[in-house]
Image: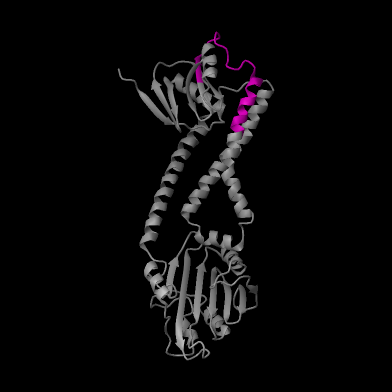
Amino acid sequence: MKDRVRRLLWPFQDWELEQQQAWLADMAKQGWHLRSTGPGLASFRKGEQANVRYRCEIAPDANQEQIELFQAAGWEYVGRRNCVLVFRAPVDEQIPEIHTDSREQAPTLRLLVRNLLVSLLPFLVLTVIVLGPGSSPDFVEQQLLEANWLDLLSLSFLLYVFVISLRGLFHTAGLIRKLKRGRSLENNVPYRTVLRRRQLVVPVMLLMAVALIASHIGARISDAQSTNFPPIPERELPMVRLSQLLDQAGYTEYHRSRTGTFLAERVKGDVFNYYRERGNLLFPVQQKMSEKFDVPGVAAPDQPTYSPILITRRFEARNPDLARLLAEQVASREKADIFRMTNLQPAELPGVDGFWRQDEGEAHAFVLLKGNVVVDVYYNGIDPIEQLIELQLAKLPFKQR
């Protein structure tokens, strides 16, 4: 007759020693005897129902000398899972407990504490990054605008590991105190509630991990096939067009240098004239438009062509509080480049919930906040900035036609 084998997900954490011992003993009473252990799995063989004691011993590795010592006392070595060695013996008074003095077992649990502290490190590092020097306005802005459901799943998984590890630390500390007081670990503790919850949670976490990997691969493929610089559509947009601001006629698309033309071919788009739409969980609407024109006969004699540039970013948040948080981070940004001005200052502007601006010669930047909408504008040109502000203010709110 062929052996009947049953493979189950191992539902308990290493530090849940008493629960593991009770579960394995109950499985033996049902005729299912542990055959082997593996990463996250337990293999059982069907046999006669029996009263069997299982004991979980903590050790850094399967030390053969230790195993032979326990075997000589009547304990069978079944297998090893992480730092947990599993032994069993029939309920027989002739076979003594592995630890006749529970105080001897207390030091072995320190390995559990060390492993749990190591598992907490990723969360602690993330906390330092978020709350430490990395929590600059630029960093916060990036997290707000790039957070997606993949990040949420990753954070959920990380929080799950953190909570489990923290619970493990407190639980293990309690076991160590119990052992030091001369009390042995219990072997008949209630475990079924935890078992049912883990049997649900573990498959869900595995599915989440698979979804994360698959979605990440899909996003990479999608990014490789798309361009970050799609052309500006003909329809009305919620941003001011550069043509609305210029008093001059006869302007044309910005004349790119040979290097700029080569770059446009490589990125499959015009890096100076494009319109892009994106979105995420917190800011479902994210729009960016860039325009740069050549306007002849306006600038100084040594600059025969006037080339103003207007870059506008517009965001719609899930709620006004998120919008205000983003507006404040954008206005106080610290990282500068040729199209970003730093440390915008609060200013008064009727009709909005927040307004920040910065002016340096012909370069101007301002941030508008109204309700759940944030508009971030950079403009470099000789036309009046006040006119641009009024035109953009008239676009709030914007309803798609």
Occupied quadrant, residue 319: bottom right
Query: Viewed as shown, does residue 236 lie left or right of 338?
Result: left
Image: magenta residue range: 87-113
Seen from the viewer's position, the closer of residues 27 and 254 is: 254
Seen from the viewer's position, the closer of residues 352 and 232 is: 232
Which residue shows up at 50% across the image and 82% down it? 308
* Residue 183 visible: no
Which residue shows up at 58% across the image and 15% down it? 97
* Residue 301 visible: yes
Check the image and report above or below for 351 versus 251: above
Q: Residue furthest left?
A: 1
Q: Position of residue 89 (x, y in %)?
A: 50, 15
Give the quadrant of the C terminus: bottom left
Q: Position of residue 335 (x, y in %)?
A: 59, 66
Colour convention of the picture: one colour
Q: Residue furthest right?
A: 181
Give the quadrant of the N terminus: top left
Query: Viewed as shown, does residue 180 lie left or right of 237?
Result: right
Total marks in image: 0
Q: Position of residue 229 (x, y in %)?
A: 41, 70
Occupied quadrant, residue 162: top right
Q: Is residue 88 magenta?
A: yes
Which residue shows up at 57% across the image and 76% down it? 365
Check the image and report above or below for 199 versus 379: above
Query: Viewed as shown, does residue 397 lie left or right of 356?
Result: left
